[in-house]
Amino acid sequence: MRVSTRALIAAGVLVALVLAGVVSFYASSAPDGLERVAHDHGFADSADRHAASDGPLADYRTRGVEDDRLSGGLAGVAGALIVLVLAGGLVLLVRRRPSSGSGTGVGSAPSSGSGTSAGSRTGRTS
Amino acid sequence: MHVPDGFLDAPTSVATGVVAAAALGLALRGARRELDERTAPMAGLAATFVFAAQMLNFPVGAGTSGHLLGGALVAVLVGPSTAILCMSVVFVVQALLFADGGITALGTNIDLMGVVTVLVGWGVFRALQTVLPKRPGSVAPAAGIAAFVSVPAAALCFVGLYAIGGVVDIPLPSLTAAMVGVHVLIGIGEGLITALAVGSIVAVRPDLVYGARRVLAARPLEVRTGAGASR
């Protein structure tokens, strides 16, 4: 049986959401390799406080949600969905741009959403 | 391996930012050749999976953990240029929303975990493909080995950056030994997760795996007739 692309992507995203939303609660909270080495070699303290550490999702916790499991799970699901939308959107923009090779500017990508070549995406399915 | 603000001095952080911007510019150009109706949907999934997997720290030895970096995995799934874009999206979201990885260190983190792991992982994967049997069963083990190598390679690059712009004077041999040592262990986990993930997709839809295209193309259609078909 051939699994459709749509089904495989949906299953994969579901796996990712379960990993970020549920399994992440059971992840090790020990310092990671770099943190451990920085601590052992005496440069861990040179880390600055993160400028975004007061954000609503900082440190993979949802601000205002006290329950650890729920707070981390919501943050994980939110992050996974945000990454899905941003990466998916970026790919769409890159594919929409004409492949003439003109223009390499990173900043020019968001302004190219004219939709003039939107049909090329569906027209190329094999 | 998310580098926080303050580990590297300002000139080094600016330089890594410039390198990251250049890598992204090249990746945007290269991704246009890689992205088609198969890799485009896989790219969103790959980035999402990397974000999720990076939340899953696994223990490596006493009081230390590590998580998937994912560069080699994504490169094998969607191609190296698209992989650099996917990985960068993950690090931007982590730095800005999750306070994971410094903001001035964003270029450093994109370079180490998004560019080095992708390029080393893809390079090792392609080298292995030339020596391993040209069949779908070789793709997942090759991806796993490539992923394993990519983690200490990124750790070594961090040591290089720290030698140039680290704010504390650390004896390099001991820093190198410690960084490579712990990241070899993390690399084992990276290799296993990568082989498992690539193998799962190769098992059902090998055509959706960018790195499997070469072996699929090398395998001609067989016309089985006579005794061969009665088996």
Image (cartoon, helix red, strand yellow):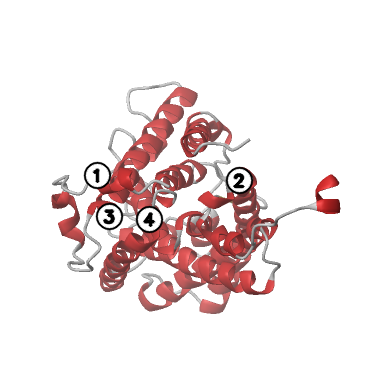
In the image, residue B27 above or below residue A91 = below
Q: Nearer the viewer, residue B62 or A6?
A: A6
Q: Quadrant of residue B218?
A: bottom right
Secondary structure of residue under mark 3: helix
How many other residues sit within 10 Å of disc 4, few (<14), some (14-19) or many (≥20)?
many
Q: Which residue is under mark 1?
A: A119
Q: Give the Cα separation between the discs numbered 1 and 4.
A: 16 Å
- Number of the label disc, if any, that sits on residue B58: 2
Do circles 2 and 3 both sit on a common chain? no
Do circles 4 and 2 both sit on a common chain? yes
Residue that lies at the very extreme toward the front in this rendered image? B226
How many other residues sit within 10 Å of disc 2, few (<14), some (14-19) or many (≥20)?
many
How many other residues sit within 10 Å of disc 3, few (<14), some (14-19) or many (≥20)?
many
Q: Amino acid at mark 4?
A: Leu
| Residues at circles 4 and 3 in contact by the CB criterion of under 8 Å | yes
Q: Which residue is under mark 3?
A: A94
Q: Tell me residue B105's x, y (percent).
A: 32, 60
Res. B6 in view: no
Total marks placed: 4
Secondary structure of residue under mark 4: loop
Res. A97 in view: yes
State which chain disc 4 sits on.
B
Secondary structure of residue under mark 1: helix
| Residues at circles 1 and 3 in contact by the CB criterion of under 8 Å | no
Name the front one of labels 1 and 3.
1
Name the front one of labels 2 and 1.
1
Who comes first in sequence, dot 4 or dot 2?
4
